[in-house]
Image: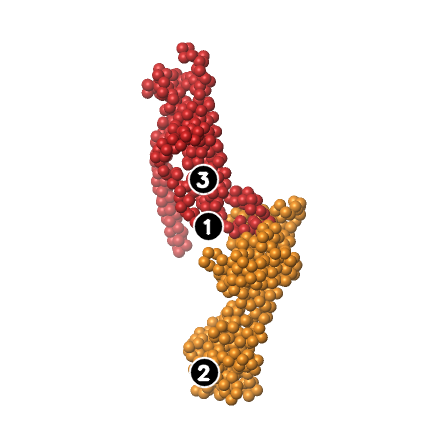
Amino acid sequence: MASLGLYNLWKRFGKITAVKGLTLEVKDKEFMVLLGPSGAGKTTTLKLIAGVEKPNDGYIMIGDKVVNATEPHRRNIAMAFETYALYPHFTVYENLAFPLRAPGMRLSAEEIDRRVRRVAEVLNIDMLFDRKPAELSNGQKQRVSLGRTMVREPNVFLLDEPLSHLDAKLRHHMRMEFKRLESSLNTTVVYVTHDYLEALALADRIAVINQGELQQVGTPDEIFNRPANQFVATALGQPEINLIDGDIITESGVPVFVAVDGEFRLEVPRALRAPLGKKGLKKARVGVRPFDIRVAGARGWGVNETETGAGAMRDSEEDRAGKAFVRGRVYVFESLGNKGVLTVQVGKARLSVLTSADFKANVDENITLEVDCNKIMMFDPETTGNIALTMTA
Amino acid sequence: MHGAGRCAVGMVDHGADGGINMESSARNRFIQSLLTVIMLIYFAFALFPIVWMVLISLKSQPELFTTKFVFKPTIESYKAITIGLKYLKGTGSFRPDFPRFFLNSIIISTASVAISVIVGVPAAYALARFKFPGKENLAFTFLSFRFAPELSVIIPLSILYRRFGLYDTYVGIIWVYQLITLPLLIWVLRGYFEDISTEIEQAAMTDGYTYWEVFWKILLPLIRPGLAASALLAFVFAWNNFIFAMILGGGKVQTVTVAALSFLASEQAHYNQMAAASLISAVPQIILALIIQKSLVRGLTFGAVKG
């Protein structure tokens, strides 16, 4: 139970720089998720915290102590490795008991047995006690590796992709178990994943990392709804956020975003006008999440296909406020059981739209999409930063 | 009708299957017996020299140069090289040197392997884990000691040994035997260490163990098969070495391989005593090989970590 602080942390492996000036504070008992693609430096960050790799620069603090010079075994940190790192010559039981038999622990044999059995029951691996790691499936190995961290009461838990090798069903089950464990563990956790759903479900706060650099730290809500930049916006959400490049023009004193040869036009929402004006941008990149786009009119929905989509709408003026319309052709439709993903070709761009599963569409059919203007994000095409946030920051 | 037809077809099939099985099992049995015969021939071929040695060692001096298989066996030769010939008429009394040479061999081979293990395990670990300039060159240099012919270095070595007072000392012989034993251990164990994931070590360290405890509790058990096999082979190579012991050792540290020659040196060629000495000196190797027979093959062919 301790807070954790990383200050301007650098780690190089030869010519490759894995961690670039990372500064991150994790509060006591906080569940912090490091989210990023593979090769982002997440695992290296965990190993630096554990002390099994040494930083080239920067400080690591656990509680109120700088631990740069502290040996791993004195840091009281438990880490689950993505490769499991089970001891091949030990049985499952011995693997689980190993941290408890460490010289610094001084536990009675009964206490060790009690703790091993308790953790094994939670993880449902108590029937595997006598097996060697080579006789386990990947999912079982992963649970043993998790169990080995959970038998102790460490200052900080470091979990490296602990659910990645489980099948979908077990993963969902384990995600729930984690959520429950989180409250019972009552410990600081740093959790590495590339799965944004895991991050959103588990985290108190998420730190998004790309190529060794921190992109944004915030609550799941902040990260998802107010991404600091284009990378964070695309890292979360499936299907990915739609990005459209276009120009900013002024029509009767109101900034308007125009893209795809004028096919796609939308009035810049009020909240974005001030920051946009201050930046004086002529070009912008609009991001719209697939569930903020609706199919405005398809067959039998009162659309005259010869007219422009906006003009064809029979919605009242009030309904149309804060909405933008764009015409396109159906590229493909995928039904995913409980929802559907419609991909629409608009000019040179392709937009993903979340629909109901029973949506019907023919390939190459003309279609009009309705975009909720108040939900859009705007990014600076040069810096890829979120225009709304770079203002406030 | 239909049912009967199907039944008949089934029976025919069954019969045909049976025929094939019988035929193929007969062929298998023939191949098996042929293999057995070949193995027996090889067995006789491989064991004959040893059998012949046993026979010679049991012969008395006058029968030595006959090729008789039937004779009156005697253990005089064994007595002569172990207890001595004091009680035999006409030869006078002298204490045989063979037990001392046998002890020399044991001391020198064991110490050589022990030092190689102490030096070689950390060296192999360093070559497997750490990155440093000239690593591969260094590793290859170790290996080159093994395939450089001993005769090519023996003269300069012998000059150096005489000058530095290492000639005919245990330290000197054990030192030069490192050329034989150390490269083998380093190269086998390096492969074993490379097979152990670094993350296993890192996991053990985060589990609360110091570097040394990780080495004793995790690494050493994982390299044990390779260590046992390579140490045994190193022991055998050290035991069998002739040229270093011959040139760099004198009467004080003589080993059995060199001592075996002395049976030919005097007025008579004591082939029977030589055979007895050779047989006795083969005993430690045979015992060791039998003890770790299984891990010998496994240890040199498989890696450390499976699964």
Closer to us: mark 1 or mark 2?
Answer: 1
Q: Secondary structure at mark 3?
A: helix
Please give the label number shown on residue B185.
3
Q: How is the image coloured?
A: by chain
Give neighbour class at mark 1: few <14, some 14-19, many 20+ (Cα, 10 Å): few
Residue at image location 36% in from the left, 34% down from the top: B153
Displayed quadrant of residue B162: top left
Residue B131 tag number: 1
For the view shown, which residue lies furthest in the front direction? B163
Q: In the picture, which chain is orange?
A: A
Separation of marks 2 and 3 at Cα, in angstroms: 74 Å
Residue A393, image x and y in percent?
57, 73
What residue is shown at x 55% (from left), y 79% (from top)?
A275
Question: Are the residues tagged 3 and 1 within 8 Å (C-beta)?
Answer: no
- Chain of the residue that carries numbered disc 3 in the rendered image: B
Q: How far apart are the two marked residues, 3 and 1, measured between alpha carbons? A: 20 Å
Q: Which residue is mark 2?
A: A263
Q: Is residue A143 left or right of residue B229?
A: right
Judge whether A363 appears above or below B299 on screen: below
Q: Secondary structure at mark 1?
A: loop
Q: In the rendered view, does B210 fall on the left or right side of B183?
A: right
